[in-house]
Amino acid sequence: MKRVITLLLVLTASFANSQAFKGKGDKKFQVGATMQEYGTGIAATIDFGAGENISYGFTTSYLLNTTTKAGTPKFVDKFDAKARFNANIGNVLNISDKLDIYPGLDLGLRNFGAHLGARYFFTEGFGIYTEAGIPLAKYDSNTIGYERFNNQFVFQIGASFNL
């Protein structure tokens, strides 16, 4: 009986009509793991559709596990917040309605950067995402110690939700 229910759930999920980005009025929330050279942590983003292929939003991250010889970092050293702007080009590339690819720019507490992400929705409300980001301009060009935490290449992976 468990196998029959599992099979029905899988088939229902695979035939569900989901769309990765709907345009103006669309809202996405994402939560996931963030990985970089000096630590791992959690990240959360929220995006709001402003047009057919444009969205804006906010992201925040916090490093839970840091590796450094400089001692124990403070909360402010491990925390980052950014405003972001995305060009949602999944429908332009015409790959799949379930897939959204979004290059974007972000302005944060520590730098001005760029990111490239993708999200794939299995159902109307649930999907997965991955995102990679790099700093383009650091507020301090001589980053040392804890300042390097949020001024380097970062990779994220996690769950995406329609709101």
Image (cartoon, rainbow, N blue to C red):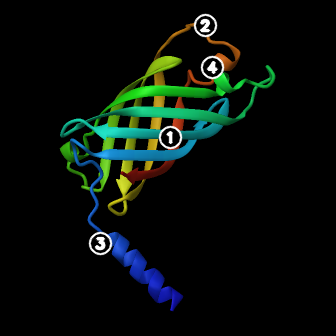
Residue type (three-letter) at the residue carrying disc 2 = Asn
Q: Which residue is mark 4?
A: 148
Residue 71 sits in which quadrant?
Answer: top right
Residue type (three-letter) at the residue carrying disc 4 = Arg
Mark sitting earlier along the chain (4/3): 3
Please name the residue shown 20% across and 49% down the image.
Answer: 94
Mark sitting earlier along the chain (3/1): 3
Residue type (three-letter) at the residue carrying disc 1 = Ala
Q: Which residue is mark 2?
A: 142
Task: Rate crowding at label 1 as few (under 14), some (14 to 19) or many (20 or more) other CA atoms within 10 Å.
Answer: many
Calculate the distance from the C-alpha at mark 4 to the C-alpha at mark 1. Answer: 20 Å
Give residue 44's mark: 1
Percent position (x, y) of residue 90?
26, 45
User: Is residue 39 toward the left or the right of residue 61 in the image?
Assistant: right
Q: Indicate the secondary structure of the residue bearing disc 4.
A: helix
Task: Rate crowding at label 3 as few (under 14), some (14 to 19) or many (20 or more) other CA atoms within 10 Å.
Answer: few
User: Is residue 125 toward the left or the right of residue 72 in the image?
Assistant: left
Q: Indicate the secondary structure of the residue bearing disc 3.
A: helix
Mark sitting earlier along the chain (2/3): 3
Placement of 104 over or under 14, stated as above or below: above
Residue type (three-letter) at the residue carrying disc 3 = Phe
Mark sitting earlier along the chain (2/1): 1
Please name the residue shown 47% across and 81% down the image.
Answer: 6
Calculate the distance from the C-alpha at mark 2 to the C-alpha at mark 3. Answer: 52 Å
